[in-house]
Image: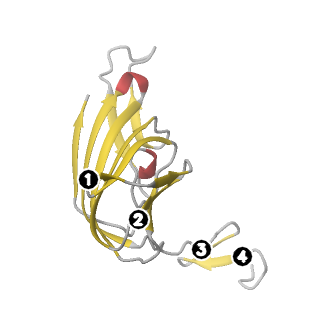
Amino acid sequence: MSFDKPGYLIGRGFVYTDYRPQFPRYYGYTVRHVRIRVRIDASNKSINGHVEYSINVTTERGYIEFDAAEMGVKSVRVDGTEARYEYDGKSLRVYVGSGDHVVSVEYEAKPRKGLYFVMPDEYYRDRVPMVWTQGESEDNHYWMPLPDYNGQASPLLVVGGF
């Protein structure tokens, strides 16, 4: 195999025919703290959530984006006031100026990735319903809007209920 042969890309010390470079994303803000409240409906494999971000917006473009797949966005607030936003089923764009802000999003979802439901079935009728997360590396945006990049870290408080 030749490294200069078309169709092969090099990265992470390995060569794969379908490898595509993945560069760090620039979100235009720094997350200082996250608080999320979720109500889990295990029988319907769905959640209702409210996530609140304390952020510092470092971009001058007039908006920020959260990764948020296949959700129903109910409301978006910036500093307690209804905010202008756009949602395309993959990304939530919130219009906000630079500086320190608190951005909150009220939403609902039936996640197909990132949050998993294990329920009683025909083989395990006595199984206790369980819900667990496994969002690494980039699947958490199916159950909560966030900057879903594995280089992004911030303090997180999760308050949940059934």
Query: What kind of residue is marked 1?
Result: Gly
Q: Residues within 10 Å of mark 1 (few under 14, many from 20)?
A: few
- Give percent across and percent down for residue 38: 29, 38
Q: Amino acid at mark 2?
A: Asn
For this view, does 69 lie left or right of residue 39?
Answer: right
The residue labelled by disc 3 is 21
The disc labelled 3 sits on which kind of residue? Pro
Of badges 3 and 1, the one in the foreground is 1
Mark 4 touches mark 1? (CB < 8 Å): no
Element assignment for label 3: loop
Q: Residue at x 48, y 72 (%)?
A: 25
Q: Are marks 4 and 2 in contact (CB under 8 Å)?
A: no
Q: Which residue is mark 4?
A: 8
C-alpha gap between disc 4 and disc 2: 25 Å
- Taking depth in this image into account, of 144 and 82 the one nearest to the observer is 82
Q: Position of residue 120 (x, y in %)?
A: 38, 19
Question: Between tags 2 and 1, which lies in front?
Answer: 1
In this orientation, which residue lies closer to the viewer: 11 or 137?
137
* Residue highlighted by disc 2: 150
Between discs 2 and 3, the one toward the N terminus: 3
- Front position among marks 3 and 4: 3
Secondary structure of the residue carrying tag 1 is: loop
Pointer 3 with pointer 1, Cβ within 8 A: no
**Among the two numbered marks 2 and 1 on one chain, the one whose residue lies closer to the N terminus:** 1
Question: Quick one: quadrant of the N terminus?
Answer: bottom right
Q: Earlier in the sequence, mark 3 or mark 1?
A: 3
The alpha-carbon separation of the residues under discs 3 and 4 comes to 11 Å
Of the numbered discs 4 and 1, the one sitting upstream in the chain is 4
Q: Mark 2: give few (<14), some (14-19) or many (20+) Cα within 10 Å.
A: few
In space, the residues marked 2 and 3 are separated at their CA atoms by 15 Å
